[in-house]
Amino acid sequence: MPPDPFSVDLEEWLSCLDRSGCRLTEPLKVVTEVMSGNRRALSPVEVYDLGRAIYPKLGLVTVYRSLEKLESAGLVQRVHQVGGCNGYIAAPQGHQHLLICQICGRAEYFTGDDISDLVSRVEAQSHYTVQGHWLQLFGVCESCK
Amino acid sequence: MPPDPFSVDLEEWLSCLDRSGCRLTEPLKVVTEVMSGNRRALSPVEVYDLGRAIYPKLGLVTVYRSLEKLESAGLVQRVHQVGGCNGYIAAPQGHQHLLICQICGRAEYFTGDDISDLVSRVEAQSHYTVQGHWLQLFGVCESCK
DNA sequence: TCATATAATGAAAATGGTTTTCAATTTCCG
DNA sequence: CGGAAATTGAAAACCATTTTCATTATATGA
Ligand SMILES: [Mn+2]
Ligand SMILES: [Mn+2]
Ligand SMILES: [Zn+2]
Ligand SMILES: [Zn+2]
């Protein structure tokens, strides 16, 4: 069973940010706490609202800057959806892709996609060299059915 | 061999728009001509620039409205990429996905992805019901290597 | 511990892509 | 042909994100 990205704890994220040269300020810690403890893709404003519940004088600009740091450090990733592409969620550990509930937004990572045969076939037919892929599954989670 | 969405001709697109209740105005025809004759994902401004080469008094607002009509009619689709999610390209015919050149932006559709085994496995493990998927391949096209 | 350099913050302003408004124009049906 | 109604383009509004800048907080090392 692969490690669950959502079980990674706050301390690890903070030391990772520390190692990458960030100062561990209160606002950054708050954004990190919100992002590490959530299983949904959150927009900057949602992070802002959740963050202010912990630290009321948090600024929205700081949320944007903190998300950028978390993304640079590889701790969160952007999530593209039909409804918008400004969501952020805890990054996968290794080769994983997202499965997102269309009703409540809850997300899980899954492993085991093997598209190497498909890639070979597509490369042969198209004469492209394939370097990477995006895969995302959409559905309904257990509690939403 | 599946039909190539990029070979669909302008007349078909126009009659499709006609059938869906649009008035075939000069600006809409111009945007349709640009979109049906291009193999790259184009942003609204790119469509605007290409369109004005044909019809100089075309307005950017009309480009937005025309792209919306083309999307509603199922003739174009939005393309999500790392560099932005405001690109539009001719829609696939049936079950196809995009392969995009990272260098020049040229895109091809491919068929034959079969992820049903993966979906079954993921459904069993996650207890989600999977309803759909996004798949996109990125690479380098023949002329860019 | 304390002084200091400097990274980080938050408010306000700027930016830039997209949408809305509205009067004028064009299409298409009768 | 009219004439109703959809469509257009310019201007203004909107809104998410970025930039600016004076102030504050952090880390470092004397
Ligand atoms: Mn994969
Ligand atoms: Mn597929
Ligand atoms: Zn759900
Ligand atoms: Zn190319």
Image (cartoon, coloured by chain):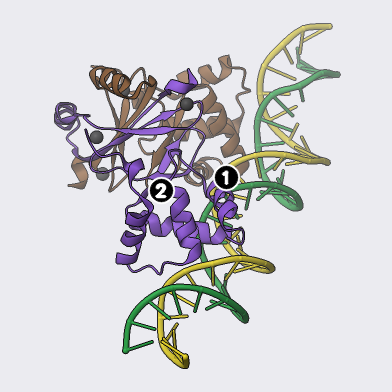
Chain colours: A brown, B purple, C green, D yellow
- Front position among marks 1 and 2: 2
**x then y, percent, for residue A100:** 30, 38
Asked if disc 2 is less than 8 Å from ligand 4, the answer is no
- Which residue lies at the image location 34% right of the left edge and 65% below the top edge? B18
* Residue B56 figure quarter: bottom right
> A136 left or right of B106?
left
**x then y, percent, for residue B142:** 42, 21
Q: Residues within 10 Å of mark 1 (few under 14, many from 20)?
A: few
Q: Residue A38 — which label?
A: none
Query: Which quarter of the frame holds ligand 2?
Result: top left
Q: Is residue D25 above or below residue B30?
A: above
Chain of the residue under the numbered disc 1 shown in the image? A
- Which residue lies at the image location 27% right of the left edge and 37% below the top edge? B96
**x then y, percent, for residue B38:** 44, 42
Q: Is residue B121 above or below residue B69?
A: above
Q: Residue type at mark 2?
A: Ser
> A109 left or right of A54?
left
Q: Are marks 1 and 2 in contact (CB under 8 Å)?
A: no
| Real-space Cα separation, disc 1 to disc 2, in angstroms | 51 Å
Q: Which residue is mark 2?
A: B36
Numbered disc 2: secondary structure? helix
- Which residue lies at the image location 46% right of the left edge and 40% below the top edge? B41
- Residues C30 and A46: in front is C30
Numbered disc 1: secondary structure? loop
Residue B142 seen from this side: yes
Chain of the residue under the numbered disc 2 shown in the image? B
Q: Which residue is mark 1?
A: A56
